[in-house]
Amino acid sequence: MAFTLIQETLKTVERAVFLQREVFDYDYADTAAIPGKAEANLRQIARRAKAQLLANSTPPPQPNEQARHLVEQFVSAAATGNVKDLLAVVRLWLLNTKLTQTRV
């Protein structure tokens, strides 16, 4: 459910920064390399992402089949503890989101 809330609430860069900082405990220097933003910008993005998640009081809609599949992949990768697999799922998730946004 938390994964779906993140998907429905945050924009692509916000999700990437939030997951890397809060889930994988990456420092800002490592996190900055992926979206290509300055560390100061990432601190602000992370702060806003947390605030948005905390402020979101309505439950997200039920996930579609594609979202369910991504969540299952994420949980499976998390269960193995393989960070490389987890990051691959996150990249796929972000790519799918970008493709969906460009189609709309």
Image (cartoon, grey):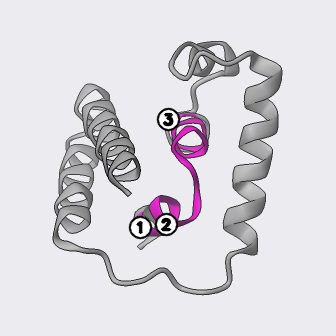
Q: Nearer the viewer, mark 1 or mark 2?
A: 2
Give the amino acid type for the residue marked by disc 2 in the picture: Glu
Question: Position of 32 compared to 79: left or right?
Answer: right
Residue at (52, 38) in percent of width and height:
16
Q: Are dots 1 and 2 in contact, CB under 8 Å?
A: yes
- Tell me which numbered mark, 3 or 1, is placed earlier along the sequence: 1
Judge whether residue 13 is colored magenta. Answer: yes
Disc ID at residue 4: 1
Cα distance between the residues tagged 3 and 1: 18 Å
The secondary structure type at the circle numbered 3 is: loop
Judge whether residue 21 is colored magenta. Answer: no
**Disc 2 marks which residue?**
8
Image quarter hosting the C terminus: bottom left
Q: Nearer the viewer, mark 3 or mark 1?
A: 1
Per the rendered image, the range of residues in magenta is 4-20
Mainly helix, strand or loop, the magenta region? helix
